[in-house]
Image (tube, helix red, strand yellow):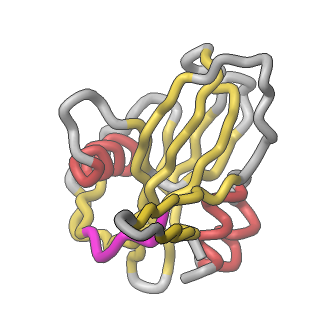
Amino acid sequence: MIYEYVTLNTKTTTFRKIVLRLFGETVDRKVIYQRRVGAYGIILHDKELLLTEQITSENNIEVQLPGGGSVKGESLIQTLNREVLEETGWGIKVVKKNGVFQRFTYMPEYKIWAHKICHVYKCVATIRKTKLLEKNHRLVFMNKKKAVEALLDTGFKYFVQSL
């Protein structure tokens, strides 16, 4: 279950509380986190997943779901389409929203501590639009089993496993 709904009834009002699933590091109460809302795609192409390999600031290669943070005035679907195109060169069709999770982490590329709210969508790849990709990104295709093994983000793993 991605959302946990807790409903409290009184005689006149119904309250609904949404609890987001947390993955990754625990919250450090001494750190001030910047909220970053983003959209990520589990993108199907034939029988494989379209993923991105990113070279990190520590010169490691990290396999990720394509996607990233929203910019002001942009919807989550617009964010997802923009980020997927930048990171993979592919266009996509969004099929459905799979869920949302949160994680608290340090983002060395931005030099910030972030409270990431990650919206995850199931998508299909449509057409490759460009071979020019965002710096330090490379397009990769993997089957589900290999993708689950390669993804480091436990939230991404959870959603890929639930396919």
Q: Is residue 70 above or below residue 21?
A: above
| Image coords of residue 69 (percent x, y) | 41, 36
Q: Is residue 56 magenta?
A: no
Quadrant holding the C terminus = bottom right
Answer with left or right where residue 135 lies relative to residue 129. Answer: right
118 vs 27, nearest the viewer: 27
| Image coords of residue 159 (percent x, y) | 58, 70
Q: Is residue 9 above or below residue 140?
A: below
Q: How many marks?
A: 0
| Image coords of residue 41 (percent x, y) | 42, 61
45 vs 130, nearest the viewer: 45
Quadrant holding the N terminus = bottom right
The answer to whether any part of residue 86 appears in the image is yes
Residue found 22% across the figure and 45% down from its top:
75
Residue found 65% across the figure and 30% down from its top:
56
User: What secondary structure predominates along the stretch shown in magenta?
Assistant: strand
Residue found 50% across the figure and 78% down from its top:
48
Q: Is residue 19 above or below residue 67?
A: below
Q: Residue extending furthest top? A: 111
85 vs 103, nearest the viewer: 103
The answer to whether any part of residue 142 appears in the image is no
Residue found 68% across the figure and 53% down from its top:
22
| Image coords of residue 100 (percent x, y) | 50, 59
Q: Is residue 115 above or below residue 112?
A: below
| Residue segment shown in magenta | 94-99
Q: For residue 126, which quarter of the picture? A: bottom left
